[in-house]
Amino acid sequence: MTKEQVKDLSDFASVSEACEYIKSLYPEYPKKPAKPAYSSLKTSAHARQYADELDAWEESRKKYEADHGAYMDKVNHLNELLETHIKDVAGVSMVPKQYRDKLWSLAWDRGHSSGYSEVYNELSLLVDIFL
């Protein structure tokens, strides 16, 4: 998903609305394949069946890992767009450059467990110190 495919986040009335919009763009999380259960292998037919199931699981596991990587790439890209928007709205550009990363780190530490809206609230408070 390119930046052009994402609606302009500045069109939203609040950071909270932009957060909800970005979350709505997250792809569906890939389903992790279940490893076949090992049971007592009483016959060679059971052993072959288990080996075949294990081979199929290994193939589906490779597909899952590729799908998971693609999922994380998309989510990280969307989060980067949202973080840039949050920094713009909070006015981080008005803070001296040497403090910008420190402000973001502090706001992230204080607010990320409650979501991006809270990170924005913390960042806004910190930016106000410089204004």
Image (cartoon, helix red, strand yellow):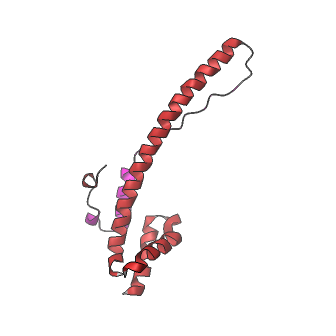
Query: Residue 28 or 108: which is nearer the viewer?
Result: 108
Residue 64 magenta: no
Question: Residue sitting at 28 percent across and 55 percent down?
Answer: 3
Residue 31's place in the image compared with 92, above or below, is above
Question: Residue sitting at 68 percent across and 16 percent down?
Answer: 46
Q: Residue furthest front?
A: 98
Q: Is residue 124 visible?
A: no
Residue 114's place in the image compared with 96, above or below, is above
In the image, taking residue 75 as reference, residue 32 lies left or right, namely right
In the image, taking residue 44 as reference, residue 121 lies left or right, namely left
Q: Is residue 128 visible?
A: yes
Query: Residue 23 or 106: which is nearer the viewer?
Result: 106
Q: Quadrant of residue 13?
A: bottom left
Residue 55's place in the image compared with 32, above or below, is above
The percent coordinates of residue 43 (x first, y second) are 72, 13
Residue 21 magenta: yes
The percent coordinates of residue 24 (x first, y second) are 37, 52
Residue 79's place in the image compared with 29, above or below, is below
The percent coordinates of residue 112 (x first, y second) are 50, 66
Q: Quadrant of residue 101?
A: bottom left
Q: Which residues are magenta?
A: 9-38
